[in-house]
Image (spheres, rainbow, N blue to C red):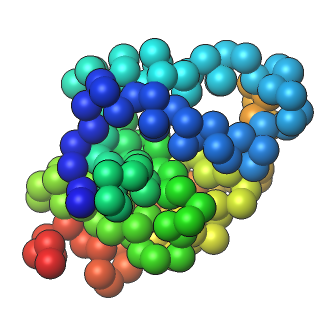
Amino acid sequence: IFRPATAADAEAISQLVLAFRLEYLLDPTGRGAEEFLASVSAEAERGYIGSTRYSYLLAEVDSELAGVIALRDGTHLFRLFVARKFQRQGVARELWRRARQALGPVDQAMSFTVNSSPMAVPVYKRLGFEQTSPQEEMHGITSVPMRLTESSLPPGIKGSEPIT
């Protein structure tokens, strides 16, 4: 089931993001990443979900959170996490396709950005994103800046295609 997130989902979203913390934290204890960790708390997620700047979509399997995607300002991929047991089943691709489709028609020159964890770079590359600069370390986390131009979206995830 794919559905928009509500404030009641904030705790589960936070827990899903934090389940991957060892893949993006520079220090496994979280030292130096306090500001970032606060930004993925349930309280912070509730704030994002309630803001018009963010659009969240969840994937659920038997009432269990399988994945989440969030766009900020319609152009920045703010969250894309799939629970480990649901990875490699097309959940990320379908979340991205549906989130993109929800934007409606966009200019072919439009681009999307993401700050990927190093481990997720292959996933974003399969979605059509390209690395734009070297890996960065800031605020206690590591990320890889990436960009996708609307005109370069791979087949199967363009927003104009019907949902099946």
Quadrant of the image occupied by residue 75: top left
Q: Position of residue 151 (x, y in %)?
A: 31, 70
Q: Position of residue 35 (x, y in %)?
A: 67, 16
Q: Position of residue 30 (x, y in %)?
A: 81, 26
- Most extreme residue toward the bottom, as rendered? 155
Q: Nearer the viewer, residue 34 or 150?
A: 34
Q: Is residue 140 above or below residue 21?
A: above
Q: Nearer the viewer, residue 14 or 120?
A: 14
Q: Is residue 153 above or below residue 34?
A: below
Quadrant of the drawing holding the C terminus: bottom left
* Residue 89 appears left or right of 137: left
Quadrant of the image occupied by residue 37: top right
Q: Nearer the viewer, residue 72 or 82?
A: 82
Residue 6 shows in the view? yes
* Residue 159 appears left or right of 44: left
Residue 149 shows in the view? no
